[in-house]
Image: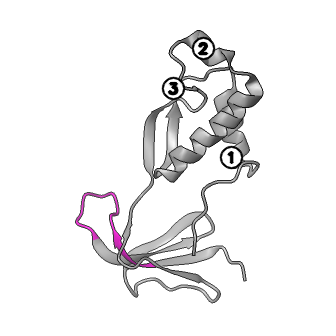
Amino acid sequence: MTTDTKLFTNFNIIDGSGADKFLGEVLVKGNRIDQVGLIGSSKPLQNTVLIDGERKTLMPGLCHAHLHLTWNNQATLEGVTMMPQEENLVHSIGVAKEVLDSGFTSGVGAASARPRFDCVLRNAINNGHIPRSKISG
């Protein structure tokens, strides 16, 4: 059974407002948060996937304010651009996955090793050509 509705329950929730964390649940429909509240406050639909957080922490995704997804740890700009484009693209996909897996769900590209690389990578992720990190459950 596949459904696009998930209820994350039994989580310590940090809602990003500055309020204290609380034991609660988050109802997600598709790729949008529908409700956040105390346990039992959501009205899940039939076929909702339940995900028990076992009192782990659930919080908003982080925003990385200065990303260089296409840079490859070289000491000079010349060194960065010496990597063949195909290898640079594969490297950049790995860096994007590492950023997502670290809790960042958005970011600002501060510079790209090649023109348009960041934009092409973003579009490939948004269009589903490069898999995003998956929520298990």
Q: Amino acid at mark 3?
A: Ala
| Residue 42 percent across, percent down from the top left | 46, 83
Identify whether 113 is placed above or below 137.
above
Give the mark nearer the N terminus: 1 vs 2: 2
Q: Amino acid at mark 1?
A: Ile
| Residue 123 percent across, percent down from the top left | 71, 41
Mark 2 lies on residue: 79
State the extent of the magenta-drawn residues as a range.
Answer: 9-21
Residue occupying image coordinates x 58% and y 39%:
95
Q: Secondary structure at mark 1?
A: helix
Mark 1 lies on residue: 125
Residue 10 magenta-highlighted: yes
The residue lying toward the viewer, choosing from 18 and 52, is 52
The residue lying toward the viewer, choosing from 36 and 109, is 109
Screen quadrant of the C terminus: bottom right
Q: Secondary structure at mark 3?
A: loop
The residue lying toward the viewer, choosing from 131 and 4, is 131
Q: Are the two marked residues, 2 and 3, in contact with CB atoms closer than 8 angstroms?
A: no
Give the mark nearer the N terminus: 2 vs 3: 2
In which quarter of the view is residue 16 placed? bottom left
Screen quadrant of the N terminus: bottom right
Mark 3 Cα shell of 10 Å, populated few (<14), some (14-19), many (≥20): few
**Mark 3 to mark 1: distance in Å?**
18 Å
Mark 3 lies on residue: 110
Give the mark nearer the N terminus: 3 vs 1: 3
Residue occupying image coordinates x 40% and y 88%:
40
